[in-house]
Image: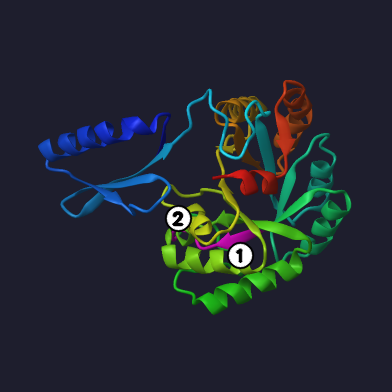
Amino acid sequence: MLVSLPNAAQLSPLESSWSKAAGIRGINFERRDPGSASAAYAISYQGRTLLALDVFLLAPPAAAAPGLPAGGSPELAIIVDDLGYDPSAARAVFAIPARVSVAVLPNLPESSAIAEEAHRRGIEVLLHLPMESVAGEDKAEKIELHVGEPAAEVARVVDQMLATVPYAAGVNNHQGSRATADPALMASLASALRSRGLFFIDSRTSPGSRAFDAALRAGVPAAARNIFLDDDELASAIRRQLERAERVAREQGMCVAIGHPHGATLDVLSEMLPEVEARGVRLVSASEVARRSP
């Protein structure tokens, strides 16, 4: 479970209250990974994990986000995932009358052509890197990063995928609920990205993800997804999520929102993004957010 806390000073008393309440009920409450950028906790009973809780400490709404000049415009990065299958869907993304970044899956018949055309049009390209999910949670890709792979194999797989997605300036994860929770694998990936000069966006497909933390520790420019636009593919729901993304950008200074090349998603983006920009939110590439993220 992910929750946010607008004031870091509230964490200590809140943590004490949680710990006291858990003790009264005979529940084990402990902090995980103290070096993490988030406050992460495990709640368990009789050896069985009941809940993994990540508390993200947000800047006060009135404050500018780290990396933004005082009085600077709020920034919103939109990433459209899962390109590579359908050239017509890619063309519809390219026609959006506003800045977006695209994440292209590797090793598909159209991966290279779509990445090349996006680059030709001045659209930022990311490698949408497949990673291992919890068993049965998502359909596995033919080639993906797996827990337990040595660093040399991780680097080899990344290079093989990059060869099929030319002009990729950065990476975000495709699926990966198991892989991104593994600190060793994420450290190996971060090292590979740093040596290749790539940024990283953690899609946060799992509340237990350690990918963002690993990237920061390795000195890789990184950011994490704030909003999924189209878990619900109804146009009305997508509009609400985009409105929410605009609010997050205004409150925190920047926001990363991820959507997919569904017809309703692309229609809403085409309709609303020019309006969002007209209201003073600057639409930026994913790399701009990653390089200004703390």
Which residue corresponds to the image point at 42% horizontal and 63% vertical from the top-left? 183
Which is nearer the eye, 151 or 267? 151
> Does residue 24 appear anywhere in the picture?
yes
Amino acid type assigned to the residue bearing label 2 in the image: Arg
User: Disc number at residue 194?
Assistant: 1
Mark 1 or 2, closer to the camera = 1
* Residue 105 found in image quarter: bottom right
As for residue 107 lying within the magenta part, the answer is no
Disc 1 element:
helix
Range of residues picked out in magenta: 128-135
Q: Say whether residue 171 is left or right of residue 27.
A: right
| C-alpha span from label 1 to label 2 | 16 Å
Q: Which mark is residue 111?
A: none
Q: Which mark is residue 210?
A: 2
State the residue at coordinates (62%, 38%). Answer: 257
At a point 84% along the width and 60% down the height, the residue shown is 113
